[in-house]
Image: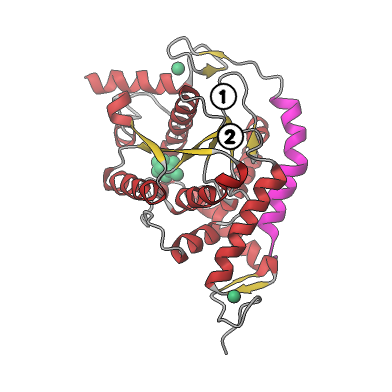
Amino acid sequence: MSVKCSFCSNKAITKLRYAKLSLCSKHFVEYVEKRFSKIISKNKLFKNMDKVVVAVSGGKDSVTLLHLLHKVSKEFNFEIIGLTIDLGIRKYSVESVEKALKNYEMLNIKYKVIELKNKYGFSIDDIAKYRRKAGIKKPICSICGTIKRYIMNKYALEIGANAIATGHNLDDMVYYIFSSLYSGRVDNLAKISIYSPSEFKFVAKVKPLAYISEKETLLYAMLRKLPFNYNVCPYARLRTFHEYIRKTSNVLEENVPGLKITFARMFLEKINPILYSHYLSEKKFKECKICGMPTTGKICSFCKIKSAMEKVLKK
Ligand code: Q46
Ligand code: ZN
Ligand code: ZN
């Protein structure tokens, strides 16, 4: 026998065990939109903001974020500027950028595309190929993360935006918290937040999907027929630890519905503020000697990667 929606007589298409709800497609979409709006109000994510850069890769999370933010932008009174970084990852990037642009056009949103190879002379594929030769020890996804954060911050700073919104979902938050605990990186733990205020030359960062799971963003994007890149980045398979945590947290969630949300909420609301005041509020930043962007050393991580890649690619 088919299960009925908790709010109407239609057939339920999903069961949210953590909320004890079975929902039809219409009520699922409404439920996600209401929760999203609640998360923003409760955490005062866009208070006194009039210009927000939304990072859109073209994947399910960022596309869902763009549409949800577009719905609430009038109510919270801010303008959205889309930012898409073409990372230069074979066919994957071509398709991702194409999907991101389709969404901007659908919603009539202003946007900017920054091509990594064109603007800085190297792509993520170049990094994958030459990083050992260039003496870069960090894994590819960690370098990719540094590059994306740098470009987002620089662009937001240049256009005078108040914040950068990213599509990190609940599963990403659970992974970040767990992996930072595991490696004992207290400074990383102190940085995991749904809202990071602006300081020095860092624009504020917001993660409005922090309590919405990957399964929910995927279902939302599918039910609303939003164009997004279904393919996964070819380098994602290298993140084996990430995959283990994802699978394990889903097994835990199966047995204890709501575990992921509680884990993330307890960390973000109770533990992070204490860590932040101890480890980050005192941190002193200065300008990178090459590009002027913030760093704790003399040269920022991005410029180090760029100059290492320049040497290898010149040969
Ligand atoms: S794009 Fe970049 Fe991800 Fe690809 S190289 Fe890794 S970090 S997996 S979100
Ligand atoms: Zn219903
Ligand atoms: Zn620099």
Tell which of 41 and 211 is nearer to you. 41
Quadrant occupied by the C terminus: top left
Q: In this image, 258 relative to 173: left or right?
A: right
> What residue sits 74% from the left and 32% below the top?
275
Question: Predominant secondary structure in magenta?
Answer: helix
Q: Is residue 192 visible?
A: no
Q: Quadrant of residue 252?
A: bottom right
Residue at (68, 65) in percent of width and height: 18
What's the image's color scheme?
secondary structure
Q: Is residue 68 magenta?
A: no
Q: Is residue 124 left or right of residue 76?
A: left
Q: Which residues are magenta?
A: 256-280
Are discs 1 and 2 less than 8 Å apart at CB? yes
Which quadrant of the picture is home to ligand 3?
top left
Q: Is residue 93 left or right of residue 164?
A: left
Residue displayed at 66% across by 50% down: 39
> Which residue was labeled with disc 2?
205
Q: Within 10 angstroms of label 1, few (less than 14), some, or many (20 or more) residues? A: some
Task: Using the rendered view, name the quadrant where residue 34 is placed.
Answer: bottom right
Q: Which label sits on residue 167?
A: none
Residue 216 x/y as whole percent: 55, 61
Q: Residues within 10 Å of mark 2 (few under 14, many from 20)?
A: many
Would the CB of label 1 be found within 8 Å of ligand 3?
no
Residue 163 position, x and y percent, is 56, 33
